[in-house]
Amino acid sequence: MNVRNPIRPLLFAAALSVPSLSFAVATPGESAPAFSEVDASGEMHALTDYEGEWLVLEWFNKDCPYVRKHYGSGNMQALQKKYTDQGVNWLTVISSAEGKQGYLGPVEAKAEAESHNLNASSAFVLDPDGNMGRDYGAKTTPHMFVINPEGDVVYAGAIDDNDSANPAVIPDSHNYLAAALDSAMAGEPVAEPATRAYGCSVKY
């Protein structure tokens, strides 16, 4: 005799009733996900603070060799200075969770910024719960995003086209970030608005 299991349809119905979870991801050509986070100095930063202005978001982990590639060589600092001198805002974001590689509290983050001469970065934003990083789909350190004055993402991806951790390759690499900023700020289409980010995984 075939006995019907009364539990199975109930479980199936319950599964259908569970809402699916979705997260916003920063996609070129679409509005940038909203954020509101505190920096190492205790100042709040929200996407709305930068309406009408250019904004770069850079994901950072002090222990990542790919981050050290760009900071140890001075490449990242040079980019920060070049574009902040042109009125671009630049936020360096730490999404490492407490206890994970790269996590920094406010005091440590300020010391790290000073050790890397990050004066050109507008702020060191702390995102220990990972909400901002997940909303943007930040996967690696570094992972770069450019947002235009209208609040739209115009670039998302790698800093350049060479995924080696050796800083010696930087002079011969094509810098996607600089190319995107130069084109977008000149009112021209960005040739490569999305690229594959490389580096260490963000330690959520």
Image (cartoon, rainbow, N blue to C red):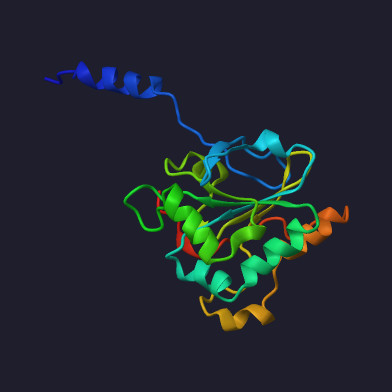
Residue 55: image x %, image y %?
A: 71, 48
127 sits to left or right of 147: left
Q: Is residue 141 visible?
A: no
Q: Residue at x 66, y 40 (%)?
A: 32
Determine whether 149 is above or below 78 in the image. Answer: above
At x 46%, y 71%, the residue is 65
- In the displayed structure, 144 sits above or below 161; it is above
Residue 44 percent across, percent down from the top left: 58, 36
Instruction: Judge from the rendering whether residue 130 lies leftward or rightward of residue 125; answer left or right.
Output: left
Q: Quadrant of residue 6?
A: top left
Question: Measuring 63% from the left and 59% from the top, which residue is drawn there?
Answer: 119
The answer to whether any part of residue 53 appears in the image is yes
Considering the image in quadrants, where does the N terminus appear? top left
Q: Residue 15's image quarter?
A: top left
Q: Residue furthest left?
A: 1
Q: Residue furthest right?
A: 187
Residue 115 point in image, percent of width and height: 51, 66
Which x, y percent locates residue 177?
Answer: 70, 62
Q: Nearer the viewer, residue 154 or 60?
A: 60
Q: Residue at x 73, y 42 (%)?
A: 152
